[in-house]
Structure formats: C-alpha cells, structure tokens
Amino acid sequence: MSDGTVAPTALLARAARRGVGVLALTDHDDTGGLAEAAAAAREHGIRFINGVEISVTWQAQTIHIVGLGIDPGNSVLQAGLAATRAGRTDRAKRMAAVFDTLGIGGTFEGALRLAGNPRMISRTHFARYLCETGQVKSTKDAFRRWLGTGRPCDVAQEWAGLSDAVSWINGSGGVAVIAHPGRYKLDRPQLRALLSEFRDISGAAIEVVTGSHQAHEYSLFARHAVEFGLAASCGSDFHSPQESRDLGGLPPLPAVCEPVWRRPALA
Ligand code: AMP
Ligand code: MN
C-alpha cells in the first residue's frame, strides 16, 4: 500500500511458496493493506502480524520505526499516521523542484503516476520513474546518485517524533522496533544515544537480520541488542522481486538474540 509492487494477496501467496511461517506486513505510514493480508495469510496457514513502518525524525535524521502487533483500529495511531502521510505530497513537490534544477523534468507527475496511493509518494516512486525513463540503470543507482541520505534530492522533512511514534505503537498494543539500524548515517556515539533513548521510552527491539544489512552487520547489531537489553527482529524489507531480497531468504537470528516475536504482545 506504500511503495511495494506486489499487492497483499499476491504477497502472501509468494510468502507461502517461499516457505515463510510468520510474516508482518509493514507499509510506510499506512495500514490499509493489513485486512487483505491477514485474510490471505489465513488461507495459506501463515502466522500474520499486523505491522507498520513509521517515518521519524530524530536529531535531524530520518529513522524508521516498525510497529508489530499494532491494532490498526486504534484512533490515536491512525491520527498519527495520517499526519505523517500528510507531508508527503509537499515533500514530493520540493524533491521535483530539485530535479528540475538538475535538468530532469516531470518527476512529480512521474512519481505520482507510479504511486498507487496518491497520498503516499515515496522516494522509491521517484527512483522507479528515473529507471523507467532510462535516466539511471537501477533504482539503487537512483538512490546512490540522487535520492539516498544526504544526496541532492533527499530534501529535509520533519516526520513524526521518536517518542510519538513509539507511544502510538505501544498505545495500540504493539511493540516498537528500530528498522535497519545499519542504514542510518550515525556515528558510534549517535547510534548509542539512539539505542539508549529508544530503550528508555519503551522501545522493544532492533532489526538485526534484514535485507538492508550486510552480513557483518548481523553480529554487530546482535551485540548492540544484547548490550541494550533490546529484542531482535528479522525482516526481508521486501518491496519487489526486481529490487529486493526475496521473502524467506534470510538467515536466522544469531543465537544470542531474543526474538521479538516471543515478546508477550506478539505471542
Ligand atoms: P521515503 O519513505 O519516501 O523516504 O522512502 C523510503 C524508501 O526508500 C524505503 O522503502 C527504502 O526501501 C527506499 N530506500 C531508502 N534508501 C535506499 C537506498 N539507499 N537504496 C534503495 N532503496 C532505498
Ligand atoms: Mn519501503
């Protein structure tokens, strides 16, 4: 419902073919796919966890906080997600203005056309538009050149506050997880500050094994999880067959980790 290319029913069929036993759907800032995904999961005998991935600004950086086991009917959570989504169209226009100055026109209209949900334009839709029009050779290349953290078209955006996102998640019965911690441009003291603040505001876990991490980061973040008393999560970060590591293809969590799916809220 945000920036994946496979609709929930087809996604669950793919997961079943790939031998997945437990799956969380975690669209960015949106829970509109959960009911369809849950129904498909029942058909396939897959244990399904309601999820979301909330865009957060922490110390002027964008961080993603995954909520697992949330109640999508919770009105405080839904108001928070609506407010978070609301800034995306204006942001997309500001991104397009930067592309215009680089001589790359039509990006707002192009990204909007590729976004199934007009209120959920993401950087991924810009990347796919650039790819489709032959201006980059892959979406990865688009992020490396234009859209990734600190690149010219990654314009400043004030997302939700960290403690707000965690309280929306916890308040709806879920657990909060820092997504792909290896992807942020944080030095060691900043990373430690994030982990201790997150733990202090009742954050539950960090992603340790994810399609967004290199193999050497699995053991690094396993150590961080243990040190900070946080549980560990595992997520493919699957967006599309062309762009992502496939579902069910990741190694297990390191044995030292406490799996987040054993936390009472998800049991
Ligand atoms: P947005 O929420 O609009 O900032 O877009 C976030 C999306 O961009 C996520 O779905 C990521 O998968 C994707 N993304 C962020 N950084 C990269 C990167 N370096 N390479 C590929 N995709 C990325
Ligand atoms: Mn995404």
Image: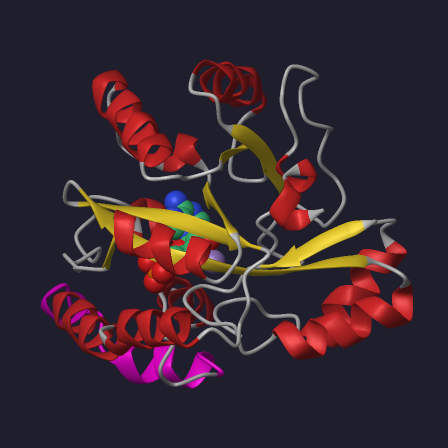
User: Would you identify the image quadrant in which residue 242 lies?
Assistant: bottom right
Magenta stretch, overall SS: helix
Does 153 sit above or below residue 6? above
Name the foreground residue: 16 vs 197.
197
Between 138 and 174, the residue placed more toward the observer is 174
Q: Position of residue 230 (x, y in %)?
A: 49, 27
Q: Is residue 100 magenta?
A: yes
The image quadrant that residue 209 belongs to is top right
Question: On the picture, is 44 further left or further right than 180?
Answer: right
Residue at left 33%, top 76%? 79
Q: Residue at x 68, y 26 (%)?
A: 253
- How are the residues colored? secondary structure
Q: Residue at x 63, y 39 (%)?
A: 263
Q: Position of residue 162 (x, y in %)?
A: 27, 48
Closer to the camera in the image, 147 or 204: 204
Q: Is residue 187 found left or right of 30 in the rendered image?
A: left
- Residue 141 in sight: no
Can residue 255 be seen here? The reply is: yes
Q: In front: 6, or 257?
A: 257
Q: Is residue 251 above or below residue 57?
A: above
Residue 182: percent from left, percent from top:
41, 30
Image quadrant where residue 84 sits: bottom left
Is residue 217 toward the left or the right of residue 165 in the image?
A: right
Question: What residue is rendered at 73% in x and 66% in y?
Answer: 11
Q: Magenta segment, which residues?
A: 99-116
